[in-house]
Amino acid sequence: MTQRYSGVIRCAHRAALVLVAMLPAGALASDEIRLQNFTSHWAGWLAVGLFATAYAFVIAEEALHLRKSKPTMVAAGFIWTIVALLYSSYGDTHTAELAVKHNLEEFGELFLFLLAAMTYINTMDERGVFDALRVWLVTRGLSLRAIYWVTGLLAFLISPVADNLTTALLMATVVMAVGGSNHKFVAAACINIVVAANAGGAFSPFGDITTLMVWQKGLVPFQEFFSLFVPSVVNWLVPAIILGFTVSRSAPESCQETAELQHGAWVVVGLFLLTIIMAVSAHNFLHLPPVLGMMTGLGFLKLYGYYLKRRSRFYPEAPADSLGSSALELEKTSAPAGRTQFNIFKSLERAEWDTLMFFYGIILCVGGLGTLGYLAVGSQLMYGDLGPTQANILVGLLSAIVDNIPVMFAVLAMEPQMDPGQWLLVTLTAGVGGSLLSIGSAAGVAVMGQARGIYTFFSHLKWTWAIALGYAASIWVHLLINGSKFSTL
């Protein structure tokens, strides 16, 4: 009996050894990233110089007409080359690989999430949803002041779902159509729209890249973001009221336009809302990355796009046996003249690829500097010496100069020990701090391009003092009404 059991044990032992041998070599290795401090090394300073140079090109994008993704992607490659060489010079060939894979994983989740969201937004645009909204506003016969408040309110309410960049561009188109040659009104309305879109995006994970990153990191639950609603309202209303006194009550020139919703427009809107629900549910209830819900929703949209493509009203002149054609052949079928043939891949092509590649460059640049030890130093200087509240307020001010995306990613990479109230505070400040300058947010930069020569850096700078009052007031309101979420200030 004993020999029989010992034989069984030996067999089990051998089987275990076989299973272990079949595992990838990396599966048994430690995944711990052991960082070293290269902040005083000349190569570390070279990496900082590369990032600063790349970001100088980003800031000068409008003047140089050089896409912002190009310098950051090149800088990312050089910075990680420096990281790998420095660590390998100390006999460590493992840390750089693990660190860059960690950064690529973070970028991959963000990339796929945004790609799905952008495809939905582009499809709604192609179906005429935004055009119909614009025409409806333009043809209401509202006064200039009413248009000022309606566009601001809509920017605040739409941006939590459609993101602040898309919302700002849509509302800017409305005020330019209404304002015409009244440049004073257009400039004031554009400032109001940028501030409102950024404020609206601050209390929703879908409203801004910074809130999305905080949510995906699991630092703030989805429902907790809505505790920033009142501070966000204050952030928009304070400068909006001040600036609103400069807007005339006169009626704009009459404008008659028409817009037609394409078939399936409201179905696409419904699918987008379902996709958001799936992303939230995947994160909250299944404890899976929210990107899984977004990509599943994108699959639903692609299936519905197939239905739209096959629908007979889009190509009634197609031969009767076309319904038996393969999907690949159908993709190549041209629509009859004067008719629109829906193609979901056109919406994918229209995604903001420069923005997506810019995120790649920024995430890897900041991640590389963190692997060299700079983020640990920055964390100590900001959160150790200044304290979390002062540091998080400073993050908002830096967002106006540097852009909130690299600043927030740096904070997330620092991983300071903060309570929920402080994470909400930095989410608020990073989201709305970019409104202080026109170049401080993607919405501001996009609207400057939309209303070129009318809404400018200096026309926005003229009202920075009023926006700063709203910034300070929103922080005060957050500390007041969400004080129970703070353990330290």
Image (spheres, rainbow, N blue to C red):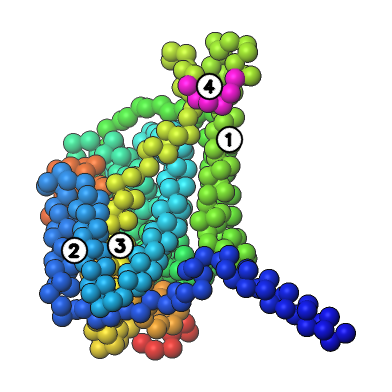
Report the magenta residues as a range.
325-332
Question: Could you tell whether 154 is left or right of 40 in the image?
Answer: right
Q: Earlier in the sequence, mark 2 or mark 1?
A: 2
Helix, strand or loop for the magenta stretch, by majority? helix
CB within 8 Å, label 2 to label 4: no
**What kind of residue is marked 2?**
Phe
**Alpha-carbon span between mark 3 and mark 2:** 10 Å
Callout 4: helix, strand or loop?
helix
CB within 8 Å, label 4 to label 3: no
Q: Earlier in the sequence, mark 4 or mark 3?
A: 4
**What kind of residue is marked 3?**
Leu
Q: Which residue is mark 1?
A: 304
How crowded is the residue under tag 1: few (<14 C-alpha within 10 Å), some, or many (20+)? some
Q: For the point 36% across and 53% down, which residue is it? A: 164
Question: Could you tell whether 9 is left or right of 25 in the image?
Answer: right
Q: Which residue is mark 2?
A: 51
**Alpha-carbon span between mark 1 and mark 3:** 36 Å
**Alpha-carbon span between mark 2 and mark 4:** 47 Å
Q: For the point 62% across and 64% down, which residue is it? A: 286
Q: Is residue 369 visible?
A: no
In front: 470, or 314? 314
Q: Which residue is mark 4?
A: 329
Question: In terms of image quadrants, where is residue 258?
Answer: top left
**Alpha-carbon span between mark 4 and mark 3:** 40 Å
Callout 2: helix, strand or loop?
helix
Callout 3: helix, strand or loop?
helix
Q: For the point 28% across and 80% down, which residue is it? A: 36
Q: Earlier in the sequence, mark 3 or mark 2?
A: 2
Which mark, residue 364? 3
Q: Residue furthest front?
A: 3
